[in-house]
Amino acid sequence: MADWSRIEALPKERLEALFAADEGRLARLSLDVAGIHFDWSKTHLTGDAIAAFEALAKEADLAGRREAMFGGKNINTTEDRPVEHTAERGEGKTESVQRAGMQHARMRAVIDAIEAEAFGPVRSILHVGIGGSALGPHLLVDALGRESDRYDVAIVSNVDGMALQDVFDRFDPATTLLVVASKTFTTTETMMNADSVIAWMQDAGVEDPYGRVIALTAAPDKAVEWGVDETRVLGFGEGVGGRYSLWSAIGFPAAVKLGWDQFEELLEGAAEMDRHFRLSALHENAPALAAFADLYYTQVRRCETRAPFAYDERLRLLPSYLQQLEMESNGKGVTIDGQPVGRPTAPITWGGVGTDAQHAVFQLLHQGTHLVPVEFLAVIEAGDALDPEHHRQLLLNAFAQGAALMKGKQADDPARSYPGDRPSSTLLLDRLDARTLGALIAFYEHRVFVSGVLLGINSFDQFGVELGKEMAKAAAKGGGDFDPSTTDLIARAGLA
Ligand code: F6P
C-alpha cells in the first residue's frame, strides 16, 4: 500500500503566500500542450507536493501501469481485459491499432454510403444509447456540430418516452436512419428505445425499417440476432470501455455530423495528448499534475467534490460527460486486490456553465463551508459572431472568479467577508476545434487513470451499476424481494 504520510504532512499555506514566496510559481505550475494552456498555480500544489506525489507514483508503479495500458496488457483485472481506448487513436499495441484502423475504415465506408444516398435521401440520424454510448457522442455533436448543416442528429438516452417523443415530433421517419449504440447490445433502455423507433418507422409505412439501422457495438452477434444486417454492424473491441468509447464506432453520429476529416482530427488531437502523457516527466505532465491536485484536495483537505465550469456554451455538456468518466471510473471502495481502500476515492464531480453558474452556485464556492476545487475552462477564440464584447466579458468573468476565490476580502460585516484561499485551476484553449477537443478529453481520461493508479483501484470496471439494474429487472417481471417502502411505492404507482 502506498505511503501517503509525506503528502499528508505537507504544510498548509495560503495561496497568496505561495505566490509571494516563489517567483517561479506560475511557470512551474503552468503548461502548454496540444493547444491548451493549463494553469494550476491557484491550487495548493507546490514543488514539494509534486515531488511527494512523484514518489508516491513511483511506489505505485505508475510508469509500469501506464506502459501496461498502452501495451494492451489486461490491466482491467476484475474483467480480465485490456484497456484499449488509446489504440483507437493510434497509440497502443500494434494489433489493436491495426484492428481499430480497420474498424474506422468500415465506419467511414458507411458514412460514404449515407452521403452517396445508398439509403435514399437521409436528413436525420436518430442515435439511441445511454451512458458512455451517448454522453461522448452528444458532447462532440453539441460542441463541434453547431455550424454543420450536414445532418440533423438527435441523441436519445432516457427510457422516459418523452425523450423519444420529442424527436418523433420533429423527424421524418422516411428520411431518418436509426443508430443503435450499445457496447453490450443488452441495455434495457437502449433496446426499448430502439424497438420503439422501429415501431415508429413501421407505423409510418417505412419499408424495411431494419434496413435503416446501423449498430455500434462490441457484441456484433447480438446486433445481428436483433435484426441488423452484418454489413451495418460497426464493431469495436471489448477493451474499449463504455465511458472511453467515443473514439471508436460509438463516435459514429459525430463523424456523420462533422464529416470524416473532423473525426480524424479529433483522434489526432487525442493521440497528441497520449504521447504527452506517455513521454513527459510527471512534473511537466498535464494529466499527472491535474491528478496530483485532485488527490491533494481529496486526501489532504478532504474535499468531497470538485467542480468544472465551462465558460463556453459549446462545452456545456462537458460536466455531465466528466461525471460519468470520473465517478464511474474512480467511485470505488476496494483496491484492485479487493481490499478496502481506506481513504476517499473519486470526489463527486459537479459543475456547470459560466457565467450562469455565477448567479446560482458561486455563493457557496465563495463563502460556504465546503472547500470545492474549481476548474475553469475557457476558449480564447470566440465561437459566436456577435459583438466581441460578449466574449471579452465571458473570459474576464472566468478569470475574475478565480482571482476572487483566491484573494477573498475582509470586511467588518462577517456576512460581507470572503475567506479567500479557495483553489481553482484554469484550462484555456486556443480555439475549440476537433483536434483540441480530442486532446482535452484524452487529458481527462489520463488524469482519471493516474488517480486510479495512485489510489490502487481499478478505474475500468463498474460493478456498482449492476445491483439497481437487477432489481429493476426483477420488479419489471413482477418479482423482487423489496422492503415495505419500495413495495408501497410500486403499488401506489399502479405497477404491482
Ligand atoms: O450502466 C452503466 C453502463 O454499463 C455504462 O458503463 C455504459 O456506458 C452504459 O451502461 C451503457 O452500456 P452499453 O453501451 O452496453 O449499452
Image (cartoon, rainbow, N blue to C red):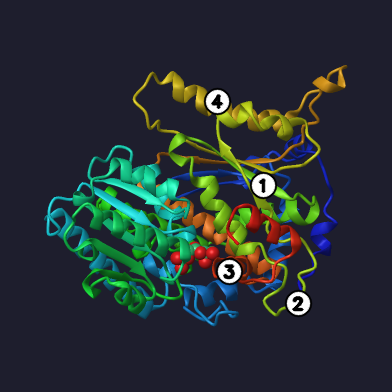
Q: How far from the left and from the top, in percent, is residue 441?
A: 47, 53
Mark 2 and ligand 1: say if the CB distance to the nearest ligand atom is below 8 Å: no
Q: Name the residue under label 2.
A: 339
Q: Measure the C-alpha gap from mark 1 to mark 3.
A: 40 Å
Q: Measure the C-alpha gap from mark 3 to mark 4.
A: 56 Å
Which of the two marks, 4 or 2, is nearer to us in this view? 2
In the picture provided, is 291 more to the left or to the right than 141? right
Q: Measure the C-alpha gap from mark 2 to mark 1.
A: 26 Å
Q: Earlier in the sequence, mark 4 or mark 2?
A: 2
The residue carrying pointer 1 sits among few (fewer than 14), some (14 to 19) or many (20 or more) residues within 10 Å by Cα, namely many
Q: How far from the left and from the top, in percent, is residue 257?
A: 28, 49
As drawn, the label of residue 396 is 4
Question: Is residue 24 visible in the rendered structure shown here?
Answer: no
In this view, 355 is above or below 241: above
Residue at 53% x, 55% y: name it.
444
Q: Measure the C-alpha gap from mark 4 to mark 1.
A: 22 Å
Quadrant of the image occupied by residue 207: bottom left
Q: Mark 1 points at which residue?
A: 306
Q: Which of marks 2 and 3 is nearer the N terminus?
A: 2
Type of the residue with mark 1: Arg
Element under label 1?
Answer: strand
Quadrant of the image occupied by residue 420: top right
Q: Name the residue under label 3.
A: 478
